Image (cartoon, rainbow, N blue to C red):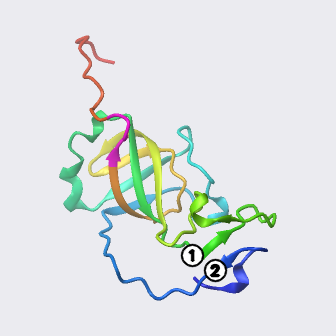
Amino acid sequence: MSDPVDLRPNEQAVELEPASDATLRFIGTIRTPWRDRKDCPRQGNAEGPECQLVLDPVWHEGLKGLEDYDTIEVLYWLDQSRRDLIRQSPRSDGQTFGTFALRSPVRPNPIGTSMVKLVRVEQGTLIVRGLDCLDGTPLLDIKPDRCAFSPKAPDKSGGED
């Protein structure tokens, strides 16, 4: 990923040794409509298209109770991002910022996070809205909304929606 030709004006990269200090376990794959980075939105939108978090079968039981939440946090590995920039010019206008002052996918450890709307759960697949990553992105983790420490209250009206 270290190609000086790909640098924008004023960007700066560093030479890195291959990473070998951690092991991550992907729990599934994200399915989105975007197959090219230029088509991918810069930020997710809760009204955006439905996307899928397809969990490996071994993790299906870990979803029990998640359907009680409206919003979940998704963590994913931005496997197509370069990892060597310490200064970036996100708008190609020559203005630069330190990598840690941006939400850019270009980072030393390209972990993406999105707060998404949980639409439904279907046999080990979560249907969500609000993602901003490429189709085929490896899924790292799923967590309930960090601001909602308990599931939504059950409907006590006795009626059906």
On the picture, is 36 further left or further right than 114? Answer: right
On the picture, is 23 further left or further right than 79? Answer: left
* Point 40% across, 56% down: residue: 75
Image quadrant where one finds the N terminus: bottom right
- Dominant SS in magenta: loop
Residue 94's place in the image compared with 12, above or below, is: above
- For this rendering, which residue is in front, 140 or 30? 140
* Point 62% across, 53% down: residue: 41
Residue 36 seen by the camera: no
| Mark 2–mark 1 CB contact (< 8 Å) | yes
Region rendered in magenta: 143-148
Mark 2: secondary structure: strand
- For this rendering, which residue is in front, 158 or 13? 13
On whether residue 145 falls in the magenta region, the answer is yes
For the residue carrying disc 1, how many other residues have a C-alpha within 10 Å: few (<14), some (14-19), or many (20+)?
some
Question: Which residue in the structure is indicated by mark 2?
Answer: 13
Residue 32 seen by the camera: yes
Q: Which is more N-terminal, label 1 or label 2?
A: 2
Among the 4 quarters of the image, the one containing residue 141: bottom left
Q: Amino acid at mark 1?
A: Arg
From mark 2 to mark 1, how far is it between C-alphas?
A: 10 Å
Question: Which residue in the structure is indicated by mark 1?
Answer: 82
Residue 18's place in the image compared with 47, above or below, is: below
Among the 4 quarters of the image, the one containing residue 42: bottom right
